[in-house]
Amino acid sequence: PAPFIRIDARGLVVMPGGVDLHSHVAGPKVNAGRRIAPHLAHRHPPAVPTIHSTGALYAALGYTTVFDAAIATAAAGIAHRELDELPILDKGIYLLAADEAAVLDALARDDAAETDRLLSAAIAAGRGWAVKVANPGGPSFWKHGRRGDHHDLDTPLPDRPVTPRQILDRLARAVGRIGLPHPLHVHTANLGLPGNWRTMLETMRTFDGVPAHLAHVQFHSYTGGDLDPDTFGSGVAPLVDWFNAHDELTLDVGQILFGDTVAMTGDSAAAEHLAHATGVPWMSHDLHLEGGCGVLPIAYREKSMVHAWQWAIGLEWFLTATDPWRLALSTDHPNGAHFTAYPVLMRLLGDEAFRREAFARIHPAVRKRSPLAGITRQYSLQELCIVTRAAPARIAGLKEKGHLGPGADADITLYRPDADLARMFAMPAKVFKAGVLVAEDGEVKSLPLGQTLAATM
């Protein structure tokens, strides 16, 4: 055991190490992202940093745990080989097991025993922590010519007698039966499409009473059709009403922040639609798998009506969801923004005056119509601690993380109090991983290897 050390934390804010519940840091899609945007590779930090830089940059912010939220089952070995080189952080992966033909066949037959067997085998073989579903049934629609258009949750797949709603329901129940620590991690259908708030509401209703985690909900909360400026906008209000009333649901937001980044998603249809809408070259990457991913560079701009709506919608989610213990701070790195922008997001949540200044700079149509204009709530330091540490640890099923009580991992971050929350959270005074000093005042002090978090089946 490490020798006992005494830490002088007088005058400092003490928090557990940060836990990023939903990020993209390793595997084939991330490596594709590194290749597709060479013009972003040399900025600081790079849009998609190397695995070694990823660990150091996270640790310098006070984060000690990260999950990659979308790894195809056949790519699990590749992802783990890369994550074995990730310094400092404990890490885990969510497996896209529902993309496999055998799993879809079992779900279509409603064969619970076979579904449980296949999911258990995939988690054990891939050393996964959770099961992720990205656009349920989407690859089947996409392969049969349904490219980028809406499909509701009750339209049967073109090649199997099962609907996306049945896939979601049967998968969520299977994850509960096999006893995974984290509930089904859900990226629902119609990501990024106008009018998709209805799909998200139907997704929530599907899980009535069944635990599920809703990923990057900002990208699933839009009104309107075909980017009509008169109808495109926020569909958060009915969604957050349902969420607030249903304790079985948890979520991460997928906040966008303005600037250049790289989009990468296990939903190839959504990536193709975005590429066609923006005219930006994209990459479809399937690695001979049943599913796949789409990758393309993207630039979010304050004066873009759509981007301004996305920014405001994410903040509306954060500020109207009533229970921070069911909410995890995320930007769906790098899709909405780089994880190194988390301190800016934390200031937007915790400093209402700063948020109003930012709101005053965005597209005038959004300033006029967004509910964000009337929201004055600001997060306390305790609430910021919850959504970056305690809640994501609890949602993920990490009993030793997200708190400083008996039995906790000795992952500790010390911050200097500062009225400028972005400055405060960007440079912790000290960061300890498993009791070892790994960063001080933004400088990495040591590079221990963290543990791989894998569910035991």
Image: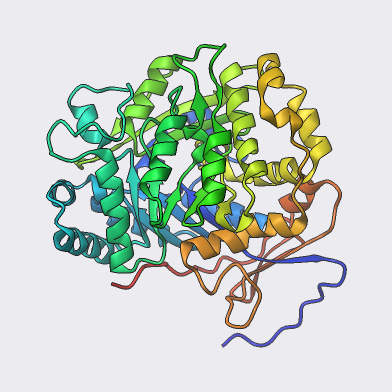
Residue under the image location 55 percent in, 59 percent down: 392
The answer to whether one can see residue 331 in this image is no
Quadrant in the picture for the N terminus? bottom right
What x and y, as percent, mark residue 198?
A: 43, 31
Q: Is residue 183 left or right of residue 394?
A: left
- Count of numbered badges drawn on the protein: 0
Whether 313 is drawn above or below 55: the answer is above
Q: How is the image coloured?
A: rainbow
Query: Which residue is nearer to you in this view: 32 or 39?
Result: 32
What x and y, as percent, mark residue 92?
A: 42, 61
Q: Is residue 382 left or right of residue 115?
A: right
Whether 67 is drawn above or below 294: the answer is below
Q: Is residue 125 left or right of residue 418?
A: left
Quadrant in the picture for the C terminus? bottom left
Residue 437, by quadrant, is: bottom right
Residue under the image location 50 percent in, 61 percent down: 395
Query: Which residue is nearer to you in this view: 288 or 203?
Result: 203
Q: Is residue 157 left or right of residue 168?
A: left
What x and y, as percent, mark residue 367?
A: 71, 21
Query: Which residue is nearer to you in this view: 54 or 305?
Result: 305
The answer to whether one can see residue 314 in this image is yes
Residue under the image location 60 percent in, 32 percent down: 313
What x and y, as percent, mark residue 378?
A: 77, 45
Whether 101 is drawn above or below 360: the answer is below
